[in-house]
Image (cartoon, rainbow, N blue to C red):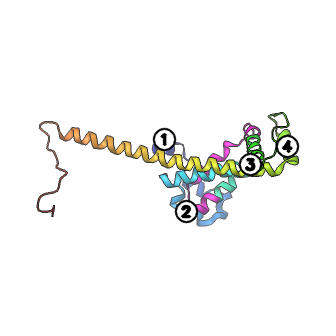
Amino acid sequence: MPRRLIQRYMPDHQKIREQKCLRFLGSCLHDPYLWHLNRHSVAGAFFVGMVCAFVPIPFQMVLAGALAVLVRVNIPISVALVWLTNPLTIPPLFYFAYEVGCWVMGQPGGGEAFHPTMEWVFGLLERNWEPFLLGCAITGITLGAICYVGIRVLWRAHVTHRWRTRHEKRAQHAGKPGRNSVSTSRPDSIRS
């Protein structure tokens, strides 16, 4: 993955640790794994962020941060992904989750016309909270799992591609006349 690009937009973890409002976390924020950008940490952060984005409660960022600390994944990515559900995207995303819940429960959904307002969403929740919560859980976990697997596969493909490119460049460089080529085969005395 483009680690340098991600690091460019990451907040400085030292400044975050020094925030007065986060001092209650104590030494939890000093775990270096919470700030690393590697395949496991980023993929896990995507899973946590996507699941928390579909939890219909206020302060989803706090939940995402706490879960990131608990499972030791990248905190800034987990918290940033919660903003998938923002005031503009909540109505259509939560309506989709509601429809998924209705489909799984075998209930007729879509009886009401969709209106992209928060009042409409809250009114729908008062009447149909069971399929909505089930749909949110299914949608969040499914998207989280897709992102987790996708990040792992893309990261591995990127690393494999870079390794092959580097290997081909070394082979081309070693084949040029006048250069000292380094043999990658082992000497006969070691081969046994």
Mark 2 and mark 3 in contact? Answer it, CB < 8 Å. no
* Inter-mark Cα distance, 1 to 4: 41 Å
Q: Is residue 71 magenta?
A: yes
Amino acid under disc 3:
Val
The image shows residue 18 at horizontal and vertical percentages of 60, 57
The image shows residue 72 at horizontal and vertical percentages of 56, 60
Upstream in sequence: badge 1 or badge 3: 1
> Disc number at residue 5?
1
Q: Residues within 10 Å of mark 3 (few under 14, many from 20)?
A: few
> Disc number at residue 104?
3
The C terminus - image quarter? bottom left
Residue 76 appears in the figure: no
Q: Is residue 21 left or right of residue 131?
A: left
Front of the two marks 2 and 3: 3
* Residue occupied by mark 2: 30
The range drawn in magenta is 67-92
Q: Residues within 10 Å of mark 4 (few under 14, many from 20)?
A: some
Amino acid under disc 4:
Leu
* Inter-mark Cα distance, 4 to 2: 43 Å
* Residue occupied by mark 4: 124
Front of the two marks 3 and 4: 3
Give the residue displayed 83% in from the left and 50% down from the top: 129
